Amino acid sequence: MNAQPVMANKAAGDVPPVHPLWLRLTHWLNALAVVLMVMSGWRIYNASPLFDFRFPDEITLGGWLAGAILWHFAAMWLLVVNGLLYLSINTATGRLGRRFFPLSPRGFAADLKAAFHGRLSHADPRRYNTVQRAAYLFVILDLVLLVLSGLVLWKSVQFPLLRELMGGYETARYVHFFTMAALVGFVVIHVAMALLVPRSLLHMIRGR
Amino acid sequence: MNDRHKRMWQMDIGPEQPDRRRFLRGSLALGALPLLGGCSISDEPIVEKALLQVSRFNDRVQAWLFDPEQLAPTYPESMITRPFPFNAYYSLDKVPQVDGERFRLQVGGRVADQRPWSLAELRTLPQTDQVTRLICVEGWSAIGKWGGVRFSDFLERIGADLEAQYVGFRCADGYYTSIDMPTALHPQTLLTLTFDGQVLPARYGFPLKLRMPTKLGYKNPKHVEALFVTNTYPGGYWEDRGYNWFGGS
Ligand code: HEM
């Protein structure tokens, strides 16, 4: 696959898509899984809140605790199988290394500054700027931690090593909550950014 | 903490809730998503059926994940949660009062010796106790100390068919549930007569509670009156209303 920026004057038919089909598919399936997991998860949270608030029922999924759990433990398969597919194709093709690295702190600072001044370049849709790289890598790691802490909550007896790494069952609840919060924070900013640069959204849908 | 548990329990799994039609209600919110357009899937039987099928699949995955040798963590007595939360599908004043003198545990199904057991007889069997964490399906957990007869010993003594698939339970409060045989034979599965060193108090399940630290709270029946060994899926009170059957942890 071609890692170099493609000349703009090439005919559209010859150039590979900005985002290959498998990436677009896994991205949108992941988005669906995340929405189902988060909304049903809020309902489960409401059954025994960790903090002094509950999520409004209208933005939750499942209707009552059993329904929410059914959704949560069904959507988890989509999230995990799809996520593993994304990660394996991404590493096997070397795309992960090309797309997300190098990742220098200096580049991050410069790009962040540019972003705040509205001058972040999106001239080449085949290259993520450093802020994007960091944000996507962050959310990938966050999702891994979210799934692992969820595994401890689901089967704390059967995964003793994971349970102890998470600091026990009760601590895993907090890990699960805060990784969810970080994920939701990412999605809010991510969707806002996608809407600010509508061309990137078209790329993620049509590939070009 | 206790208060909150009680409140949540009344709201979310209170007795007026478990009407099957309603358990996917609130997916209304999903109808607002452009993905699914205006179609309300709240009462969509296909969705409900698919979700329940995944839940059956998850039963099999949990049976596969279940390691009969893997012990749940135990804790020092100093970590016992006091007061230990009360939880049932009714409030504290509805807890059944069972007469311990006249009580007999009924034993049936694929069991060679179907003689009923008095509490005094059960107390003559070898006793053991353990401090473990009870994890509720709602998310909270609490540490308690239960003592009684190792359930695998009891099943052997009554000549139960240990190759059978299920052990079912019927309780004095109308509750019922069932478990898989591998969990029934797990070394930490106890037919308990005591809680925190005292005769099991009514609120925690007098006269008998089956305690399994490898399963969620609703799988641990209290006020057990009868148990039976069977190959026919017996279901359960919450399980028949949409909660996962295996309920392992
Ligand atoms: C709900 C959870 C979501 C997560 C976890 C997520 C995560 C990600 C990740 C990790 C990437 C980089 C993929 C790669 O190149 O390997 C990405 C790209 C992208 N996402 Fe999302 N996403 C989510 C939802 C959405 C939504 C709802 C939208 C649209 C409104 C969206 C629009 C995009 C676009 C346009 C890109 C490509 C950006 C570019 O080409 O510059 N995402 N997303």
Image: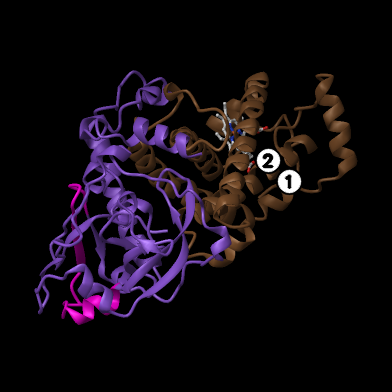
Instruction: Give left or right: position of A155 versus B177.
Output: right
Q: Position of residue B99 (x, y in %)?
A: 18, 56
Within the magenta stretch, is there residue B153? Answer: yes
Q: Is mark 2 within 8 Å of ligand 1?
A: yes
State the SS at label 2.
helix
- Tell me where residue A180 appears, x and y as whole percent: 58, 39
The residue identified by callout 2 is A136
Numbered circle sitting on residue A100: 1
What range of the chain is rendered magenta?
B151-176
Q: Please give left or right for residue B117 compared with residue B189 in the image.
A: left
In percent of the image, x 20 and y 60: which residue is there? B100
Subunit bearing disc 1: A
Question: Mark 1 and mark 2: span between their CA atoms?
Answer: 8 Å
Viewer-closest of B36 and B111:
B111
Q: Is mark 1 within 8 Å of ligand 1?
A: yes
Residue A111 in sight: yes
Task: Please report the residue visible at 44 percent of the width from the left and 33 percent of the height from the top.
Answer: A43
Q: Amino acid at mark 2?
A: Tyr
Nearest to viewer (mark 1 / mark 2): 2
Q: Which picture quadrant has residue B102?
A: bottom left
Residue sitting nearer the eye, A21 or B89: B89
Chain letter corresponding to the colour brown: A
Q: Quadrant of the C terminus of chain A?
A: top right
Q: Is residue A105 magenta?
A: no
Residue B116 sits above or below residue A65 on the image: below
